[in-house]
Image: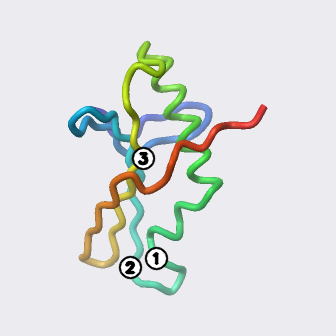
């Protein structure tokens, strides 16, 4: 549906539909494991930021809680691609 959706809160790499879900995808690439795996780069702070942007996207498009949401990670290491559906739960913003 969209690529590189940006707001003041941050960016979401891909927004797609998969069955009943509105899927917010984070794409991470690493050449090797020297700095950890691509999945390691999507820590709690990054998850929280993605969720804040996803919340904004849903409000902007009038979706609210009417659509099921999922957060996926697409991890690319060298030439290996791993799609991790439902990689993390929604992280609620504090305050």
| Residue 92 image offset from top left, x and y in percent | 64, 38
Q: Quadrant of the C terminus?
A: top right
Question: Mark number for residue 37?
Answer: 1
Residue holding disc 3 = 71
**Residue at the spot 54% in from the left edge and 40% down from the top edge:** 51
The residue positioned farthest toward the left in the image shown: 19
Secondary-structure class at tag 3: strand
Residue at x-position 42% and y-position 35%: 5
Label 1: which secondary element: loop
Q: Which residue is mark 2?
A: 31
In the rendered image, the vertical position of residue 86 relative to residue 15, given as above or below: below
Please, is residue 6 above or below residue 37 in the view? above
Task: State which tag comes first along the sequence, 3 or 1.
Answer: 1
Q: Residues within 10 Å of mark 3 (few under 14, many from 20)?
A: many
Q: Is there CB contact under 8 Å for labels 3 and 1? A: no
Residue 35 in which image quadrant: bottom right
Q: Nearer the viewer, mark 2 or mark 3?
A: 3
CA separation, marks 3 and 1? 18 Å
For discs 3 and 1, the disc positioned in front in the rendered view: 3
Q: Secondary structure at mark 2?
A: loop
């Amino acid at each position: 549906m969209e690529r590189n959706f940006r707001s003041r809160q941050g960016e979401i790499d891909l927004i797609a539909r998969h069955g009943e879900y509105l899927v917010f995808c984070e794409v991470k690439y690493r050449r090797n494991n020297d700095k950890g795996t691509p999945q390691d780069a999507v820590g709690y702070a990054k998850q929280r930021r993605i969720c804040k942007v996803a919340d904004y996207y849903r409000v902007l498009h009038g979706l609210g809680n009417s659509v099921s949401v999922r957060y996926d990670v697409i991890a690319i290491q060298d030439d290996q691609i791993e799609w991790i559906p439902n990689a993390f739960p929604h992280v609620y913003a504090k305050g």
